Image (tube, helix red, strand yellow):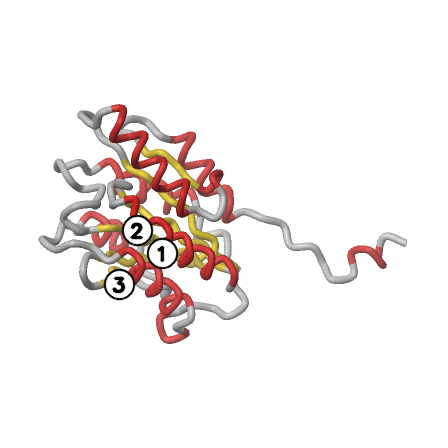
Amino acid sequence: MTDVIILYDTSKDTSPLLGNSLHSLKFIERLADSFDMTHSDIRLAMQTFSNDSQVKFDFHYIPSHDMKAKIYSTTIENTSGNLTTALSNVKTLFSSTTRGSRQGARKICYFFTNGKWPSSENSALKQKVNELHDVGISVNVMVSIKDGDSYSEIESALRNAKEISFDPYRVYLIEDDDSSIVVNAAARESRYVECPDDIFTSKH
């Protein structure tokens, strides 16, 4: 069992939607398709945040076309985001059985942002990501860049993402082009083999 949360920044400063760029939403659609939820035990939820958080859809089943409609209904809110609070709310959603979360499931969060928060926030964000990791929640930082971003802007965004991540390999760069390789790499974490408890005794 795997429960997955798409945590999406809709604040006025750090949302991937800035500049009317929709490629991050297209990426989420393709990521959801790659999970193959029809034939595997994966449940997907999406939560957006700026000053407040909003659950777009929870872990309960909804038809694919309804899910995609909710993904593309995401818009920027004219408020600044609170990243540490947003990450705290991930833990709340993952522990909510009324929202369809399952106690025994692996827990994965894909955190979508443009990475352009002040570097002074990195220490608090790193602590929050580590706290989530300690309770079994993997956080992948999905940094969306767009045409027109300068090299220094991209470097700064990636530096922020790597500084807050538990592992640099959990940072993904989403560009405004065909990103099927990145989609497949990001989705790979949801695929795993669970060995039986007696795997070693059964081999003798």
Q: Is residue 47 left or right of residue 192?
A: left
Point out the frontmost of discs 1 and 3: 1
Query: What residue is shown with label 2?
Result: 121
Which kind of residue does numbered mark 3 sit on? Val
Which kind of residue does numbered mark 2 sit on? Glu
The Cα atoms of the two marked residues, 1 and 2, are separated by: 6 Å
Q: Quadrant of residue 18?
A: top left
Query: What residue is shown with label 3?
Result: 55
Query: What residue is shown with label 1?
Result: 124
Q: Position of residue 95 (x, y in %)?
A: 42, 71
| Residue at 20%, 38% in the rendered image | 22
Tell me, yes or no, whether the two marked residues, 1 and 2, touch with CB atoms within 8 Å.
yes
Which kind of residue does numbered mark 1 sit on? Ala
Q: Residues within 10 Å of mark 3 (few under 14, many from 20)?
A: some
Which element is circle 2 on? Answer: helix
Q: Is residue 199 left or right of residue 141?
A: right
| Residue at 25%, 45% in the rendered image | 118
Q: Position of residue 168 (x, y in %)?
A: 47, 39
Whether 146 is drawn above or below 138: the answer is above
Q: Quadrant of residue 148?
A: top left
Whether 103 is drawn above or below 145: the answer is below
Which element is circle 3 on? Answer: strand
| Marked residue nearer the N-terminal end (2 or 3) | 3
The Cα atoms of the two marked residues, 2 and 3, are separated by: 24 Å
The count of marks equals 3
Quadrant for the C terminus, please: bottom right
| Residue at 18%, 60% in the rendered image | 51
- Specify the farthest residue to the left: 78
The Cα atoms of the two marked residues, 1 and 3, are separated by: 24 Å
Point out the frontmost of discs 2 and 3: 2
